[in-house]
Amino acid sequence: MRDIRVGVVEDDASACQKVLDYLNRYQSESESENPGAGGPGGGVRFTVSVFDDGAKIVEKYMPVYDILLLDIEMAGMDGMEAARRIRERDDSVVIVFITAAPQYAIKGYEVGALSYLLKPLPWFAFKQEMKRSIDMVRRRGDKSILIDAGGSPQRLELADVLYVESIRHTIIIHTLSGKLSVTGTLKSFEERLAEHDFFRSNSCYLVNLRHVTGMEDQDCVMSNGERLRVSRPRKKAFMGALAQYAGLAGGA
């Protein structure tokens, strides 16, 4: 399991340090209980970024975090407003509010917060909440990948990807909302997406089978109306993969 990327947004230095100490303690305990483990419940490692104002995380926010631990009451932009703006760009990150004012907690549901923790922050409650958050991250982990688009890392929801195209030495990822240009090879993406119902239709295209609506002659028809050529040597295997996917999806 890769590192869990955590953003801590807290303007009180002592409260922030307590969260960081708890993250270190959680990581240490999980590694000592499950040395070398990568499965659920063990082997957790965190990569942590700290912000002392909601505006600072919002300013250049990229959807690269797995979990955000947000204080609600801050002198600058408060955690609730920060969460609203973050949700405009990232609907997957797990948000947990940390607050001394429980009356604000109900508003957390408006921004899809997983839950909230009350200050002063008890270790046991923090530990339980982190376990819930990490479990959610791991359940979602097979539905997205992290890519480097224009030098900026961002999370890519695989359900939104129509197909991956290779043009010379550039990879173009065609999504429901537009195109992303990244460096790499189609072969590397094929290996990376092998377990996610993507299939190589020819030397140029790696197709998301969930968006294939049918076949017409030598082309597969995508959900956005595009037609992508399926090479003759690959057609039989492509049709087999499509039939298998349709069977699995139909039985899901």
Image (cartoon, rainbow, N blue to C red):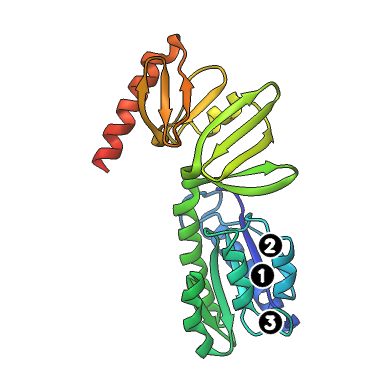
Give the structural element (helix, strand or loop) at label 2.
strand
Name the N-terminal-most of marks 1 and 2: 1
Question: Can residue 182 be seen from the camera position used here?
Answer: yes
Name the N-terminal-most of marks 3 and 1: 1
* 10 Å crowding of disc 2: few (<14), some (14-19), many (20+): some
Select label 3 or label 1 by which is in front: 1
Q: Residue furthest left?
A: 251
Asked whether 102 or 17 is in front, the reply is 102
Residue at 41% x, 32% y: name it: 209
Q: Amino acid at mark 1?
A: Val
Gap between marks 2 and 3 measured at Cα: 15 Å
Q: Quadrant of residue 166?
A: top right
Question: In the shown orientation, is residue 183 left or right of residue 121?
Answer: right
Q: Position of residue 62 (x, y in %)?
A: 67, 56
Q: Amino acid at mark 2?
A: Val
Give the labeled residue for mark 3. 15
Give the labeled residue for mark 2. 48
Q: Position of residue 225 (x, y in %)?
A: 44, 32
Question: In the shown orientation, is residue 98 left or right of residue 17?
Answer: left
Give the labeled residue for mark 1. 8
Give the structural element (helix, strand or loop) at label 1.
strand
Q: Position of residue 177 (x, y in %)?
A: 55, 46
> In what quadrant of the picture does the C terminus appear?
top left
Residue at 61% x, 39% y: name it: 179
